[in-house]
Image (spheres, rainbow, N blue to C red):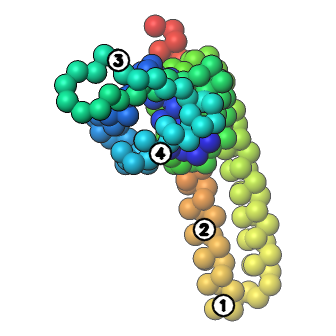
Amino acid sequence: MIDSELALAALLGELGPSSGYGITSIVRQRGMQRWAGLSPTSIYQGLRRLEARGLVSSAPDLAKRGRGPVGRLAALTPAGAELVRRELTAALADAPEQSTRYRIALAFVPQVGERIAIAQLVARADALRARARQVRLARAAGDGAMGGAADGAAESAAESLGARLVFDYVLAALEHEIAVTERLTEILQEARSS
């Protein structure tokens, strides 16, 4: 399931049966066209693709009033709801940092459940710490190799400086992501205890 379909299906899981127009209104209210990649076109196309895969069903909107053709109400099927829950759960632990998929998973944590979301975020923080350790080891191995290869050579110094900048950039990003993940875990734990 691509990110826009996951966001759309998760919205249906939250809202219940909805029209494409109603979904478009919610997407605008929440700014999801920017952070989730949803546009009116992707909403209607996504609904058709999800329905073709048996993840969404639709029926005429018999409550519609006013002019224009009768619209359709889309709803997640049980298989669709299960797939959405699995995809959101996996994304909390495994989606790349700052990715659309991760933001979607955070936005729809209630569909995963706080207990499971906490466990997934703890696993994410552990994986990030392991990656940071690997980067530190690679940086240490690189520092030793570069320093001994051609001490004093301008080319070697430039390579060493560039490598150090990249390693420090990656480490800073990982450390930031670890801190944010720990904070999100705390927020969920506080919500769970209240």
Gap in angstroms between the C-alphas marked 1 and 4: 54 Å
Mark closer to the chain start, 1 or 2: 1
Between label 1 and label 2, give the one nearer the viewer: 2
Do the residues under discs 1 and 3 have CB atoms within 8 angstroms? no
Observer-nearest of 42 and 190: 42
Q: Amino acid at mark 1?
A: Glu
Category of crowding for the residue at label 4, using alpha-carbon neighbours closer than 10 angstroms: few (below 14), some (14–19), many (at least 20): some
Determine the secondary structure under disc 4. Answer: helix
Gap in angstroms between the C-alphas marked 2 and 4: 41 Å
Between label 4 and label 3, give the one nearer the viewer: 3
Mark closer to the chain start, 1 or 3: 3
User: Residue 179 placed where, x, y %?
Assistant: 54, 39
Residue denoted by label 2: 166
Mark closer to the chain start, 2 or 4: 4
Q: Amino acid at mark 2?
A: Val
Residue at image point 47% right, 15% down: 191
Residue denoted by label 3: 62
Gap in angstroms between the C-alphas marked 4 and 3: 22 Å
Category of crowding for the residue at label 2, using alpha-carbon neighbours closer than 10 angstroms: few (below 14), some (14–19), many (at least 20): few
Which image quadrant is residue 16 in?
A: top left
Whether residue 165 is visible, yes or no, is yes
Residue denoted by label 4: 45
Between label 1 and label 4, give the one nearer the viewer: 4
